[in-house]
Image (cartoon, rainbow, N blue to C red):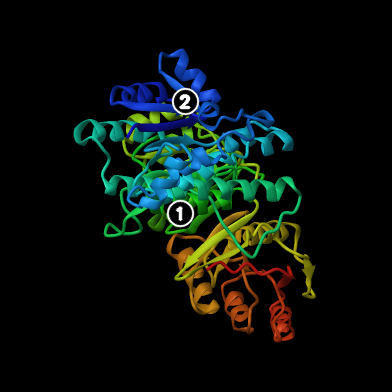
Amino acid sequence: MKKRALISVSDKSGVVEFAKKLEELGYEIISSSGTAKVLKENGVNVIEVSEITGFPEIMGGRVKTLHPKIHGGLLAVRDNPEYMKQLEQNEIEPIDIVAINLYPFEETVKKGADLDEIIENIDIGGPAMVRASAKNHKFVTIIVNPEDYDSVISELEEKGETSLETRRKLALKAFRHTAFYDSIISSVLNKEFGINEKFPEEFTIPFRKKEQLRYGENPHQEASLFVSPLEYEGLSIAESEVLHGKAMSYNNFLDVEAAVNLVKEFEETAAVVVKHNNPCGVAIADTVEEAYTEAFSRDPKSGYGGIVALNRPVDLKTAEKMVEVFLEVIAAPEFEKDAFEFLTAKKRNLRLVKVKNFDKKPEGLEYRRITGGILVQDRDLELYEKWDIVSKREPTEQEIKDLLFAWKVVKHVKSNSVVIAKDQKSVGIGPGQTSRVDSLETAVRKANEFGFSTEGAVLASEAFLPFRDSVDEAAKHGITAIVQPGGSIRDPEVIEAVDEHNMALIFTGMRHFKH
């Protein structure tokens, strides 16, 4: 029997060389019009699909391969006598190798095409042929990625055919490819049609592997980075540019995400230092150098080996400060030329990460995997529902500035969390305790350890204070104002305690749990 290969590709990279090699190995090449034209122009003998089907391409190419003479050749089970008899009766030749990649739907969306053009770039015949070939992988080799051309040719040259193991691997890749393709289409059309259904009955998320990571959270765990195309375009930490240093690790990505999301809360010049996904120092200042210096000084012990995020370009003065300590990553919108040269010369392994759009927050959904399922929720983008002064004493103008600063920070600290702040700089941060009083004590201890006074400072709690004990403890340390969501059945008791200590209290009406 003849050996036949069907080639119909949108991405033409490597296809001419691949077709020529197949031809040398005795394969007859079938192709659709666009690919056939390229192959013919490069000296490959091609039989066009319309010659096989006896039917012309119609509707601008929408209908060309959806025909029994194509799909019969793809789906015929070679060791089934009845199937082979039917092939003979209908003058259908089996197809042994199929190379297909699909209409460039994703690229069409990225270039800003209108809805009609987007829909026109939804491939129909391609996925049908891919799935048919993959289904019949016992006999058919399906290739959806040009990167696999060389390995297939090598195996054909060495053995005369591909192995079942190879065909299974390629079939699995093919099914993933069509599933990925359809997932992008459903996601895009959900937006383009204006439906924007966040939680449909059936939910898919397309992800493409970007890189293999050295390991996960720990060396015994394998890990990779996957990116979701067309989602968070220009706002993705996963697609930020590493300008210098070692490759980003699993933990680096998590920490940079945490640091950048926090520093994006501020319009003013700000710096954030993060360790193990929690901020350990945050500051607003007039200059980048001052903001970084103040943020790092808040907890230099925790900041050692930490992640720094700035919402302004890194200048030379700031860079000179940064090399005094060990840092894992510096994330910023830009690195000035002299600062970049200085940092790269001084710190070979320090990761310098350029992150776009510090003035924009990523919107949409966030996902967390649990065993047997996935939790999906809106991102926590809001800050407060109200800003109600519920105490007898109104906060001063400076207290209000500090309360708003502390409230922005505490939103990004693992629960239970408390942030003490003064002069729009963190004084002490207490993350992740099972008791809110413990969180407060941790924040006070941190402040005392590094020589920062809590006298005249303010306090933010990401969830309501369930008892007056936190208020009494805060008053002992000279804290003068508190911001919290409110909503506890003991709010009157808490307000009474605040008034007893002549403190100010603001309710925001919005909780910011972070687990």
The image shows residue 480, relative to residue 140, as above or below, that is below
- Asked which secondary structure carries label 2, the reply is loop
Q: Is residue 284 visible?
A: no
- Residue type for callout 2: Lys
The image shows residue 500, relative to residue 422, as above or below, that is below
Name which residue lies at 23% across and 34% down: 160
Could you tell me how far apart the alpha carbons at marks 2 and 1 are, in whole angstroms? 37 Å
Comes first in the chain, label 2 or label 1: 2
Residue 309 point in image, percent of width and height: 51, 45
Residue 428 point in image, percent of width and height: 52, 63
Q: Is 136 or 76 nearer to us in this picture?
A: 76
Residue 254 is labelled as 1
Residue 231 point in image, percent of width and height: 59, 46
Q: Is residue 369 visible?
A: yes
Whether residues under marks 2 and 1 lie with C-beta atoms below 8 angstroms apart, the answer is: no
Residue 149 point in image, percent of width and height: 35, 32
Q: Is 404 or 119 nearer to us in this picture?
A: 119
Name which residue lies at 67% across and 45% down: 267
- Quarter holding the N terminus? top left
Name which residue lies at 76% across and 50% down: 194
Q: Is residue 218 left or right of residue 12?
A: left
Disc 2 marks which residue? 12
Name which residue lies at 56% across and 56% down: 204
- Residue type for callout 1: Leu
Q: Is residue 35 left or right of residue 347?
A: right
- Asked which secondary structure carries label 1, the reply is helix
Q: Is 2 or 13 nearer to us in this picture?
A: 2
Q: Is 167 or 294 nearer to us in this picture?
A: 167
- Residue count near mark 2 (Cα–Cα under 10 Å), binned few <14, some 14–19, many ≥20: some
